[in-house]
Amino acid sequence: MADKKKAIEKSKGFMKEFKEFALKGNVMDMAVGVLIGGAFSGIVTALTGDFINPLIASIGGAEIAGEIRLPWVNYDGLDPEQIKALSLDYGHFLTTVINFLIMALIIFLLMKGINKLMSMGKKKEEEKPAKPPEPSKEEVLLTEIRDLLAAQNGAAPAKPQQGGKKK
């Protein structure tokens, strides 16, 4: 019975910890990024399939949607679906590589822009000069005593050095 209670308490602790993790901002941001990336992937795939592949085919005369038939396979009497299943589809592979390169370039440019924006905010914070530290109560009191002694002796008060310290 005690083992059951320990197991239940342990699972409640685990669930609480998981809930805290899942509701953190970073996890939610990552989830949104994955969803947007999936949608954006569809756009890049359409761009590659509908624009880039036809341009490559028209300029170079190369057919992107090609396949290589394997020499050891007998294709006699097979329908087109079976032939495609037994062939190497290099056209689809090349299209996927082009998609990857486009996505990598776009992500690189986005990250470069985001980093630049983040560094601009940091530079503004760094440019503000720091205020000189206030003298401590002891320093203020010692300065007043020095000035009073100098006034009693008829001498002018000493000029402070850099950093708020006086001679």
Image (cartoon, helix red, strand yellow):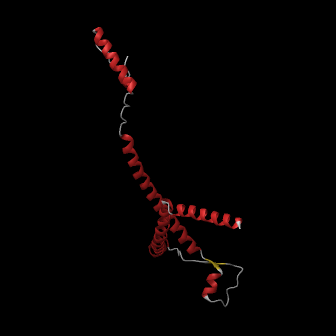
Image location of residue 158, percent across then percent down: 32, 15
Whether residue 102 appears in this view of the structure is no
Q: Residue at x 41, y 48 (%)?
A: 119
Image location of residue 16, percent across then percent down: 56, 63
**Residue sitting farthest toward the bottom:** 77
Whether residue 134 appears in this view of the structure is yes
Classify residue 66 by image quadrant. bottom right
In this rendering, would 124 be left or right of 71? left
Front-lying residue, 81 or 113: 113
* Quadrant of the drawing holding the C terminus: top left
Q: Residue at x 60, y 77 (%)?
A: 67
Classify residue 138 by image quadrant. top left
Image location of residue 163, percent across then percent down: 38, 25
Q: Residue at x 47, y 66 (%)?
A: 32
Classify residue 3 by image quadrant. bottom right
Front-lying residue, 84 or 35: 35
Image location of residue 145, percent across then percent down: 34, 17
